[in-house]
Every structure is written in structure tokens, then in C-alpha cells.
Amino acid sequence: MAKMAFVVEDEENIREVIKCALESCGLHVLGFEEAELLFPEMEKHLPDLILLDIMLPGMDGLTALRQIKAGPAAHVPVILLTAKSSEIDKVTGLDLGADDYVTKPFGVLELMARVRAALRHTDQSGSSKSVLTSHGIRLDKERHEVTLNERAVELTLKEFELLKLLMENQGKAMTRNSLLDNVWGYGYAGETRTLDMHVRSLRQKLGADCDGGRFITTVRGVGYKFDG
Ligand code: CA
């Protein structure tokens, strides 16, 4: 799945240049004119990277950075864009948790190099605690990868989320509605056919090799569980 970047920059021409540069790095890009617009969007989905201008109308970039680092997007790398080459901005930004900064005017190649470095950093932070293993199945939350006995298993996003949730709650029976709520969100309560279809497909994908799928068991009248 393509990575997603959010770009907050009030000057449209600069925003467009950044957008093009990031898209040529293979990223999906959403542009925002104001930092306030970022937060409702992040309630829907978190990006893999945020480029944040400091001088913005309304909420300034440093205030936005503070708010980002205090919320669910705290782990998302942030690159600050600053028109000023003022040391104080950079230091404050880095103190507040920014990963890097780019001083305007910047070259597109420099920007792309910084973006790639920031993304590499998050790829490597896939530490052992973000990896779940059981019965030959290895699920890497950060990399969004699943292997079965060291062979890659291609899962859809929902199958991945479902397996993750079951493995995180290994040995515990999960009700159909709690699985639906967590993986599909509210409004899916009662859509048990959707869930059952995904479980069937997940079992098939995990079972093709060495019966990994049989560890997802049906708990009659309740839902499913990943056997401990
Ligand atoms: Ca600006």
C-alpha cells in the first residue's frame, strides 16, 4: 500500500511543488492550507509523514507540531518547512519532536532526500515489540507484513487488521461485534457475513502452507479466537 503524506503549506505554488516531489517518491499526498484542517483528517486516518510549514495563517506550525506530538499521531515523522533560517525556530522545532526541517527556498532533490530519510527511519523503527509471532505466523505491525513459516502471505488491509486484533488477544474469545467495531468501525455492527467471509479467506491464506489457519477457531455463539 502506498504511503501517505500530509502537507501543510499556505502558499499554493509551494504546496504544489512539494506535492509533485512527494508523488514522485511514490507517496499519496493530501495538501492543507491551514494546520487546523489537519486534525479532523487525522481522526479519519494517520499519515506516514507530515510536512509542516511554520509560518501559517491561524494556527502556526510549531503550535500544530505540539498538538500532533501530544495525540495519536505522535509517532508520525514531521518535517518542518521554514522560510526563516532562524536557528531558534529549528531548535524549538526539534525540541518539540520534529524529525527534520527544510529551509525555504529548498531544492526539490534536497526535499526528496529528506523525505526518504524520514520514511526510512520509520521503517527501521519496526522494533521487536511491534511484531507478533505465534504458530509460525509472524505479523509485523509497522511494516504491515505477514509471513507464515518465513513465506510472505498477501493479506488485504481488513484481513491484516483482523489477524492483528486476534493475535493481540490471543487465547481470548472475541465477539463478532467487537471484531466488526474494531476492524470496520461503527455502523458495521451486525454485518456478520462480512466478518465471516474475511475469516474464511484469512484461514485459507494462512492454511495453504501448514495449517496456520486452524488456529483461528470459531467460538460458537460468540465469535472467534486465536488459539494460545
Ligand atoms: Ca507559510
Image: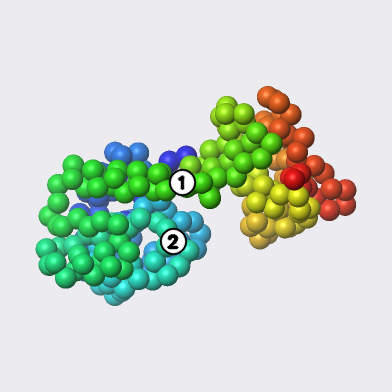
User: Does residue 51 appear to the left or right of 197 in the view shown?
Assistant: left
Residue indicated by mark 1: 126
Q: Secondary structure at mark 2?
A: loop
Q: Based on the displayed image, in which of its 4 quarters is residue 86 positioned?
A: bottom left
Residue denoted by label 2: 73
Residue drawn at 64 percent across, 36 percent down: 137
Q: Give the color scheme: rainbow, by chain, secondary structure or one colour.
A: rainbow
Task: Write the residue at 35% across / 43% down.
Answer: 120
Mark 2 is surrounded, within 10 Å at the Cα level, by few (under 14), some (14 to 19) or many (20 or more) other residues, namely many
Residue at the spot x=78%, y=47% of the render?
224
Callout 1 crowding tier (Cα within 10 Å): few <14, some 14–19, many ≥20:
some
Mark 1 vs mark 2: give the one in front: 1
Above or below, comparing residue 9 to residue 196 in the picture: below
Label 1 vs 2, first from the N-terminus? 2
The amino acid marked with disc number 1 is Gly
- Of all residues, the one furthest to the top in this rendering is 209
Counting from the top left corner in percent of width and height, residue 2 is at 43, 41
Task: State the image coordinates of residue 163 (x, y, percent, origin top left).
Answer: 65, 44
Figure quadrant of the C terminus: top right
Contact (CB < 8 A) between labels 1 and 2? Answer: no
Can residue 164 be seen in this snapshot?
Answer: yes
Circle 2: residue type: Ala
For residue 226, side relative to residue 7 (left or right)? right
Could you tell me residue 56's position as x and y percent? Answer: 24, 69
**Cα–Cα gap, marks 1 and 2:** 16 Å
Q: Residue at x 25, y 66 (%)?
A: 93
Mark 1 vs ligand 1: CB below 8 Å: no
SS of the residue at dot 1?
A: loop
